[in-house]
Image: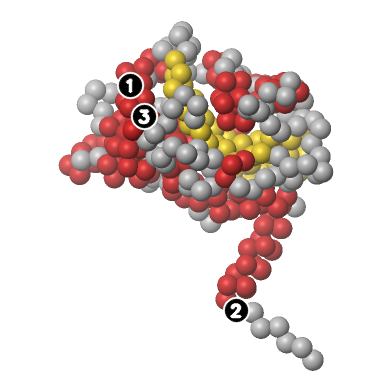
Amino acid sequence: MFFSCKNEKDIKGDTLNNEVSNVAHQFKSVDDVKLYAGQLTRIDSFPSQYITPRPVDVWLPKDYSKDKKYNVLYMHDGQMLFDSTTTWNKQEWKVDEWASQLMAEDKVKDFIVVAVHNISEIRWQDLFPQKAFNFLPEASKSNMKSISGSKDFKLSGDNYLRFIVEELKPVIDSSYSVFTDRAHTFVMGSSMGGLMSMYAVSEYPTVFGGAACISTHWVGAAPKEDNLYPEAIFNYMEASLPKAGNHKLYFDYGNKTLDAHYPQYASRVDEILKSKGYTEQNSKNLFFEGTDHSENSWNQRLDQPLIFLLGNN
């Protein structure tokens, strides 16, 4: 008779594998979302010990095949990406349109999209770069909480990233035919999602090889005079943004509606990128004249960050 003796690490590994397998089987085809191309699968309530469970979608290109490997693009505000008829403002990113077109034209590497839905009531808490709060002057922290617009000021950005890295990514890596290394793993978002994408690369530089930060919400919360959030965010970036060499960083901004508050910070972003050793080959900070803070503006230029992160050149 043979006995198997497993140590604690082995037992934890088996438990994690079982949990990943159980969650992976919950992905179901989504038939009520109108797509330009490809297919969408969803877990309606992705389980998590770190954040409030929420839907997670996975978009696969129309020729998805298990016989080849795909890059992975993680995106925030996942319910806004594919079908304007289902969104609160009747706008969308047109991710499936752009991804399908660019792959068909061989302008980008093959990739899938993992779309994490937001929960509107706690979106700010989930997407604010949590450690940037520590760069506020101690005497100002209470005042800055009040301009966040959050009734319950409990930052969860670190746990949001732990959810993606420790709970979601293992399921994606085991369920789909994807590359799992940094060089093929990217993150993208707009506004607060832009801040979180920067934060993801900074906190997990060995996981994410690049970030696209669209209309990045440098003001951090509601735009107001004497707002200390921008300086705190930039101080965090100076301390934690990875140095150039293994990453691609894309930022952009317009100058209408909420985006009108962003051009004043462009030079500071440029300075930080330069101080970290980034050049035009591995970083962008682009201005789009006359564009506003909306999916309709972002979907007009989505090809640029996609080609920058995933381009075949």
Q: Secondary structure at mark 3?
A: helix
**Does residue 249 appear to the left or right of 18 in the view shown?**
left
Furthest residue in direction top, as rendered: 290
Circle number at residue 267: 1
Please name whichever residue, 229 or 269, is drawn nearer the observer in this view of the structure: 269
Q: Residue at coordinates 24% horizontally, 23% vertically from top-left? A: 225
Quarter holding the C terminus?
A: top right
The tag earlier along the polypeptide, 1 or 3, is 1
Mark 3–mark 2 Cα distance, whole angstroms, equals: 48 Å
Q: Residue at coordinates 44% horizontally, 22% vertically from top-left? A: 285
- The type of residue carrying mark 2 is Asn
- The type of residue carrying mark 3 is Lys
Mark 1–mark 2 Cα distance, whole angstroms, equals: 54 Å
Whole-percent x, y for residue 303 in the image: 61, 20
Mark 1–mark 3 Cα distance, whole angstroms, equals: 10 Å
- The type of residue carrying mark 1 is Ser
Residue at image mark 3: 274
- Residue 122 can be seen in this image: no
Circles 1 and 2: CB distance less than 8 Å? Answer: no
Q: Secondary structure at mark 2?
A: loop
Residue at image mark 2: 7
Q: Secondary structure at mark 1?
A: helix
Q: Count residues near mark 1 (Cα–Cα under 10 Å), then give few for <14, some for 14-19, many for 20+.
A: few
